[in-house]
Amino acid sequence: MIYAGIDAGSRAIKAVLFDPDGQRLLAAGLTDQGVEQERLATDLFEKLCQDAGLARSQIAGVIATGYGRNALRFADTTITEITCHARGVHQLLPATRTIIEIGGQDSKVISLEDGGRVRDFAMNDRCAAGTGRFLEMIATRLDMNWETLSALASQSTHPAIISNMCVVFAETEIIGLLASGQPLPDVVAGVQNAIATRVAAMAGRHVSPPVSFTGGVALQPGMARALEQVLNCPVSVVPQPQFTGALGAAVLASERRKGKV
Amino acid sequence: MTTAPQKISLAQWDDRYEQLCRNGMREPAYGGPLRRHVVRDLDFRLEQLQFDNSAAALRLWNFLLTENARLHQARANGDQLVGTMKDLGTVPVMAYALPGLRAFYPDGAWWTPCLMENSDQLLQQADAMGIDASFCPVRAMLPAFENGEHFPKPDLLICSTGAVCDDFSAIAQRLEHLGHPIHWWEMPRRRTPTASEKACTLAGQLVAPRMQVDCVQDELQLIAQALGELAGKTLDDAALSAGIRAANQVRRLLGSLRQLVYSAPAAPLPALEMLVAEMLAIHFCSDREETIAVLTSLLTEARARVRLNESVLAADAVRIFWVNPVADLRAMNLLEELGGRICGTDYMFTHALDLISEELPPLEALARTALADPMVGPTADRALRIARECQAGGAEAVVVSRIPGASHCAREGEIIREIVRQQIGVPVIELEIPPVCDALLPALGSRLQALIETVRARRPR
């Protein structure tokens, strides 16, 4: 039997199909988030099934996660992102003890115990400074796409210091830095460092290694390095980090069917 | 009443009220249907809440929601009103020890924006007075003092300062500058005695130097004089001792209620009603005798439900220890909707729940109580008490709720999390809950749901 996980995030909807017998990811896809969340998720899910050559009836269970999870009525049940990311990361990197997940509108630090069980977690509150929104803001301000931004950051030699922890005020600060002639790569790297600092503050003093980094922002080269610097320990980027939540949801769907959870 | 316990909406309370009346329910003078508080006082938030369906809960809500009206009535009857601010539980014991004095808690206006869903404009008016959203919602009391539309202006205002919340000191200073004279009293920051200092034990397994107890006692002596002048009668040791015994009666009742409800295998009363009941400890909701009656009624109801093994929640609800009161009452419903229940609390006034010594000289006993205030000492002291109570109450997780703008301790959540994790190893999360949290409900719900999932996954299979 095949299981599906749908992660309806703030910026994108991600979906995966998982085969528990072979412990394989059969298919993964994503689409931009929009007003009609359920239609977008349904279309994505159906396309994924079609591409994998599967009929809907062959999907034994669907779990939705992410902030828009409750809008997906076709899912069998919903589980929060915390539980799904934890399960997804444990599936891929089972030694992980700390997960850092940075998404479009929130960030999380999840502590795991043996067996991948969640020990504790912390999430950002109403502030966007530790989230992908910060990077989006600077991409918009510089009229660049996500990939160009990443490439720029890797060229930095002396990252700028962004002192403001508020995205709105930081934007003003960034405009000032650019106006003063600060090299663009250094400004972008400075933003990455500011995000990393914010997330590290949320993690508190006890971050147990191994640390794994997931969520869409983990695709940004340089972010893992910025986190390593502030956390003072190695940080591994989870393979296909944008799909970890959806994968966790699919794995949990298969385990529920088998009565493991 | 025989109807099975359940949580019901305001609309359902309309029918329930009729049913209770038909069954012969006897109400106090402030009784009546809950709906009238929406119609008359514009307490719109009640329409979004779920309430316990017992007559005891109805009495509790009516007691809470008629406080301003009862205060106006008391003034009309010739009582002198004492506004007791910030100390959360000590000065009211003194005020109620004198006949004709009635203490209330103007800071309680911080719930008004929630109850009236901001239709009162109190927070916006506080902005205009220079006390903006960077301050605690207690700032709602400033315009409430000015417009007189809520509580009556007190005859005497007493406020502690020093090692208390910075926000509150700033707000109270602004109040005084607006023409409301305040009798200030100094609260030292509680510290551990040095080796050469004489130590005094306080409630909650705390200690303080003798000189700090003496200092607070001197301050309380001045308050006793001020209260005596207002009442036209000396507040002597005999009257004070009687006041302490009456306050302890309230505290014993609350202690029994908390113990019963929080330790019962299935919660006999909801978290929301328990929050309101605990708040009665601060100033007896302006009527000490009625507080005893309200709590007795709740305790009787809870005992009956426990005896019959009846509950308002599922038996496997996740046991949560809750730290700090919420600015939006809706949050307490939300916790239970998502599968949680309260098994212990620290709403920032644990010193008002602890019994006051009846053996010590009364002013000294009160000084020791005031110094045990969790807000006047290191947060680590508070965290250790929370950890002990979590362990005793079988807490599976801790929620530290934050009040936007409140500055009791900027790092209190982190300190509590560290110590609780270290001592008992249960998950701890922090939540920020504004006065009306509707826009944040999905995010709050996600965090609470994640906590509940985490606890359930940790339970032995």
Image (tube, coloured by chain):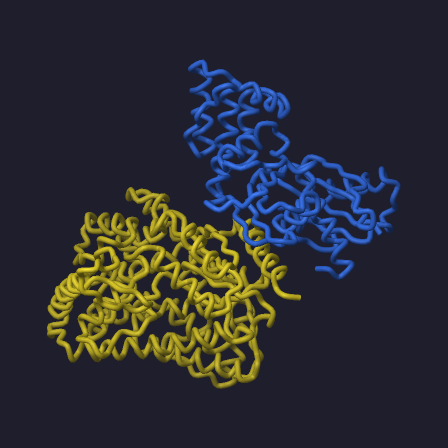
Asked if residue A256 is positioned above or below residue B310 in the image, the reply reads: above
| Residue nearest the observer in this picture, A129 or B23 | A129
Q: Is residue A76 visible?
A: yes
Which chain is represented by blue in the image?
A
Query: What colour has chain B?
Result: yellow
At a point 37% along the width and 78% down the height, the residue shown is B253
Asked if residue B274 is positioned above or below residue A115 in the image, the reply reads: below
Asked if residue B45 is positioned above or below residue B70 in the image, the reply reads: above
Q: Is residue B118 visible?
A: no
| Residue nearest the observer in this picture, A217 or A47 | A217
Q: Looking at the picture, how far across and down is residue B52, in whole percent? A: 51, 72
The reply, left or right, for residue B10 in relation to residue A220 is left
Hey, which quadrant is residue B388 in on the image? bottom left
Quarter of the image with the C terminus of chain B is: bottom right
The reply, left or right, for residue A57 in relation to residue B422 is right
At a point 37% along the width and 80% down the height, the residue shown is B293
Q: Looking at the picture, how far across and down is residue A240, in whole percent? A: 70, 36
Hey, which quadrant is residue B133 in on the image? top left
Hey, which quadrant is residue B226 in on the image? bottom left
| Residue nearest the observer in this picture, B300 or A237 | A237
Q: Looking at the picture, how far across and down is residue A120, in whole percent? A: 54, 53
